[in-house]
Image (cartoon, grey):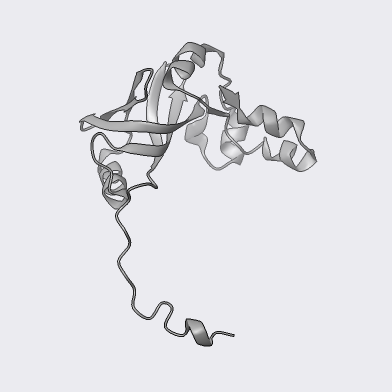
Amino acid sequence: MLHLNEIKRRKGLESQLELYVHPQTYVARTIHDFLREKEEVQTTGFWSACLGGNPFLYDSTLIQFQNVRYWRVSEDTVHLQDITETLPASIIFPLAWNMIIESQGIVDGDKVQEAIVLYQKSKDKSYLYKIRKSIDKPKPAFVPGLFQNFRYAR
């Protein structure tokens, strides 16, 4: 897995200052990589979580997955699946999650381009934190007049 905080640490002073407010974040190539390396992840400290405005991220790590399949298996549980493994993840606020899924047009079996999991190492528990589907999204409604005066805008 790629540890994004380590990359920022190697950059200049501005990037190092950002480390005080950003949670520990990793990018996993596959779900199998995450499951194999989850014991080595660093968790977000108390001050980083509080200074970043997200105290619920304390003692947690954000893990980013790309191009995984989404399956809703119950009201409060989803499965993320790639070619190597399946990762069960809990949903913290099911009602809010339903609105997010509907707004992005995500249904069971869809491939999502980004899924971010909040992993609590002390509990060995994963929660779906964010999801983004950009391919095959429903097209936005046409807004007449959006480019109405486009050719005269010089």
Q: Position of residue 60 (x, y in %)?
A: 50, 26
User: Which corner quadrant holds the N terminus?
Assistant: top right
As drawn, 7 above or below 31: below
Quadrant in which residue 85 is drawn: top left
User: Residue lying furthest left in this view?
Assistant: 74
Residue drawn where x is 74% and y is 36% of the image? 16
As drawn, 19 above or below 148: above
User: Which corner quadrant holds the C terminus?
Assistant: bottom right
* Side of 136 relative to 60 (left or right): left
Q: How many marks?
A: 0
Q: Position of residue 124 (x, y in %)?
A: 42, 16
Front-most of 96 and 82?
82
* Side of 125 relative to 154 (left or right): left
As drawn, 98 above or below 69: below
User: Residue lying furthest bottom in this view?
Assistant: 152
Q: Position of residue 136 (x, y in %)?
A: 32, 48
Residue 56 in view? yes
